[in-house]
Image: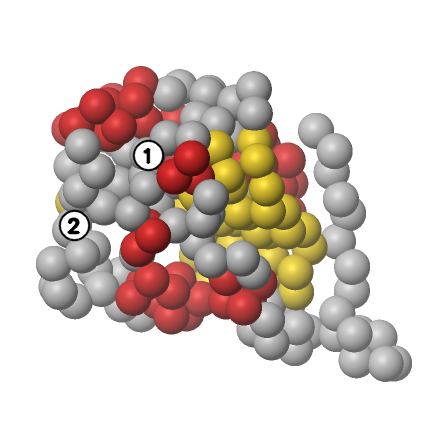
Amino acid sequence: MTNAEPDRHVSRHLRMSAPGAWMVRFQPLIRPGGSVLDLAAGGGRHTRFFLDAGHEVTALDRAVEPLAPFAGRAEVIEADLEDGSPWPLAGRTFDAVVVVNYLWRPLFPMLLDALAPAGVLIYETFARGNEAYSRPRNPDHLLRAGELLDLAQGRLQIVAYEHGIVEGDECPGVKQRISAVNDLGASTRDDGEPSPHPLSSR
């Protein structure tokens, strides 16, 4: 799930059980009961969270053994996203695509194409500057300032964006995160602007 990071770093992510606050905050944007793609699902903490919230979940990772407890509840797909194989979900769309602590830039176009109309992208991972705190330190695995904004600009309505130091978290460091909705072309307003979405504080 983490771009071949050392085993100690990977195991730290697999041990985390609570859903990330950014996921919890913006889950209400997703259509009730809608489908969720949990990309690089790791130990399944967000698979569990979205299942418990009533969503249909597709959990994808190159190592699916930690996802075995979700057999029968979620669709579990084993796939290496970085070995040049075809995108395993070609032609499929989801009401949400969620990504946490994972970055493989060649996937960006596929993630946008996987969003159904009104689908929600909820993305959070490490950014440049994190090398001063912990792994990952490789700049190939760290977002540049504004990179997720650039990804969504002109394609999605950006609901929230943050970039900075996150402390008091299971996985502290320099993070960048975005929540954005695939509804730029679905305006009912006279000025063509997309209708705004509520900002949950939970």
Q: Is residue 35 visible?
A: no
The mark found on residue 79 in the picture is: 2
Rendered position, 197 above or below 64: below
In the rendered image, residue 78, in percent from the top left (x then y), is placed at 16, 45
Q: Please name the residue shown 48% across and 27% down the image.
A: 172
Amino acid carrying mark 2 in the image: Ala
Query: On the rendered structure, is 87 left or right of 198?
Result: left
Q: Which of the two residues, 168 or 194, is positioned nearer the viewer here? A: 168
Residue 189 lies, in percent from the top left, at 84, 75
Counting other residues with Cα less than 10 Å from the Cα at mark 2, is it few (<14), some (14-19), or many (20 or more)? Answer: some
Left or right, residue 15 beside residue 25: left
Q: Nearer the viewer, residue 196 or 6?
A: 6
Outermost front residue: 132
Amino acid type for the residue under numbered disc 1: Arg
As drawn, is 82 to the left or to the right of 42? left
- Residue that protrudes farthest toward the right in the picture: 190
Q: Residues within 10 Å of mark 1 (few under 14, many from 20)?
A: some
Tag 2's secondary structure? loop
Which residue lies at the image location 26% right of the left edge and 28% below the top edge?
A: 9
**Tag 1 residue:** 135
